[in-house]
Every structure is written in structure tokens, then in C-alpha cells.
Image: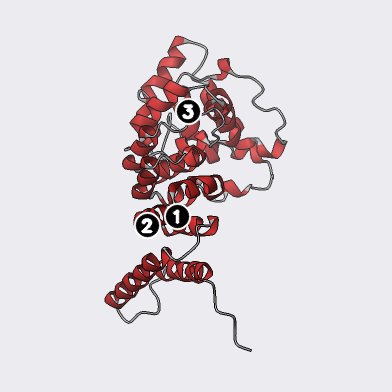
Amino acid sequence: MSQKPLKPTDSWLKAAATFRKIKSSKNGFVSADAREGFIHDRFTWLAERLAQTAGTREVYREIMRLGSVELLNISVAHHGLDSWKKEWNTVGAGAPAGAGNIALLQRLADLKFDLETSAGKILLTATRTDNVDLLDLWFTCDLGKDPSTKFSLEKVILDCGPLCAPRIHQMIEERADSSSSYALGSIFIDAIRKGKPKTAAYLRACGISFSNISNVWTDLAPDEEFLGRALEAHYRKFEGSAHAEMAFLRHEPDAVDILGRPKHARFAGLSLEDLFEQSQGSLRGSSMPSQLENPTHA
């Protein structure tokens, strides 16, 4: 029995998925020119056939995955902006946000699509790749100010590179404690508990200290404490007197410089490797957690 012919929309979706796989692979072609020629021909087919497809959320999601401004423009012209916006809550900009696709994100912003639901992913991608242009788009679109927007500021701090550091630091200073995502005291506690020297040093340079917080070790299993206890002991040395405060400033006079350094570098005179060595006395035969198996990449 012969198979039933695919409907135009189903045929387009299948071709689009195949196109994405081929585009991400370099296998199966005799030369780079042959691959590029095939990709060009298949993209042209997708663009020409798009006007024959129905405006469904599956089609819109596939356009986001393909990351093409041209296909977005064709679809908006054919299917209508209202149709897109009706489905936007279930389509979203997650795919271009994760890929750091500035051109597509900018086009979506120009068309007044709401990017706030993808604000966290855009910010994390910008800092992970140290992409100042993507970060500029984040600020230009005024993202992340909605108190309901959730993302890991600790991950932003850990991943931030030197190009993004000045603007990220400015944002943190301006928005500190404006929502749960910017609760610096809680992030400092978490950094101490988990033994994260970069996060601890940066927030200490921002004025967060043990005098601002309490209950660092609440609800933490004893065998999880040894890294954090070593980091706590290190930072306790920088509190309690003007002399201690100056000792920290001699190590770390610039919060922006801290923010721009790799997470495995040295912070306030301490690296992850140093921290691991200092914590050895607390292990006393405890099993090593996975984050310690390669301490320079924790």
C-alpha cells in the first residue's frame, strides 16, 4: 500500500527538520562547495514553499529553530503578525536566545514581540560567550526588570568574561535586591556553601559580607561542608576590623576585574585548587563529591 502524500505543511516541517540536521553536519558531502550548494538549494525550497503552509505554532517554532530572519519575514507577510502573536506564548524566542542569534532577536524586537520570557536565556548566553553585542540587545530591549523573570545570577557571575563585565556589574549595582534573581546576600551564602571563590570574591567586593547574612550552614549535610568551610575561613579573615577590610582590598581592589576573570583563576589570594587543598583536613575519609574530581573546573 502506497503511503498517503504529506500535506504541504507537514511536508515543509519534515523538510525543515532535515535541513537543520544537514546544516549542523559536515558529513556526506564530497566537498564544502557541494555542501553549501545543497544548503542553498534546500533553503530556497523552504522559502518558496513557506507561503503554501498553514500558520501553525509548529511552523513558527521551526522558523525559530532555523534561526532565519528571511523565513520569519516571509511568514509574517503571509500568515500575518496577529497569527504569530496569538501563538507567541507557546513559540517563544528560546531557540534564538540560546544560539545568541542577534539578527533574529533584533527583528523580533522590531516587530514588538515580547522577549521577556527569554530574557534569562539571552543574558546567560551573552555572558557565557562574552558577547557584548548580545548583551547590548538585552539592555536596549530593557529586559530582566520584570520581578517575575527568573535566572541564575550566580551563573551569570561565574561565566562572565572581561568584555561583558563592566555592564553586568553596573546592572547588578542598579538592580540589587529588586527581585529574587538579584538577592545578593542569598547568592553569597550559596557561593560560600558550595565553595565558589569567584562568586564569593565578587560579592564581597560589592559590599556583601558575613555581617549581612546568617545561617550559612543551615540544612547542609556534614559531608557537603568541607569546601565551603575552607572558603568561609578564608573570608572571615577579611572581616572584623579596618585592617582586615584593607587586606581584602589589597587583594581585590576592583569588582569589575573580578567579574571578568575565569572562574578557575585566583580570587582574594585563593584559587579553586588552593581551596581544595585547604579543605583536605576536613575530608577525613569522606567520599569526594563530583565537583571536586576536577577542582579547576568546578
Residue 79 placement (x, y as % from top left): 45, 55
Q: Is residue 191 left or right of residue 76?
A: right
- Mark sitting earlier along the chain (3/2): 2
| Residue that numbered label 2 is attached to | 74
| Residue that numbered label 1 is attached to | 79
Q: Is residue 181 above or below residue 133?
A: above
Q: SS for tag 3?
A: loop
| Residue that numbered label 3 is attached to | 145
**Residue nearer the viewer, 34 or 9:** 9
Q: How is the image coloured?
A: secondary structure
Mark 2, Cα crowd under 10 Å, few <14 / some 14-19 / many 20+, is some
Q: SS for tag 1?
A: helix
Q: SS for tag 2?
A: helix
Q: Amino acid at mark 2?
A: Ile
Q: Is residue 86 left or right of residue 52?
A: right
Q: CA distance from mark 3 to mark 1?
A: 32 Å
**Residue nearer the viewer, 160 or 297:** 160
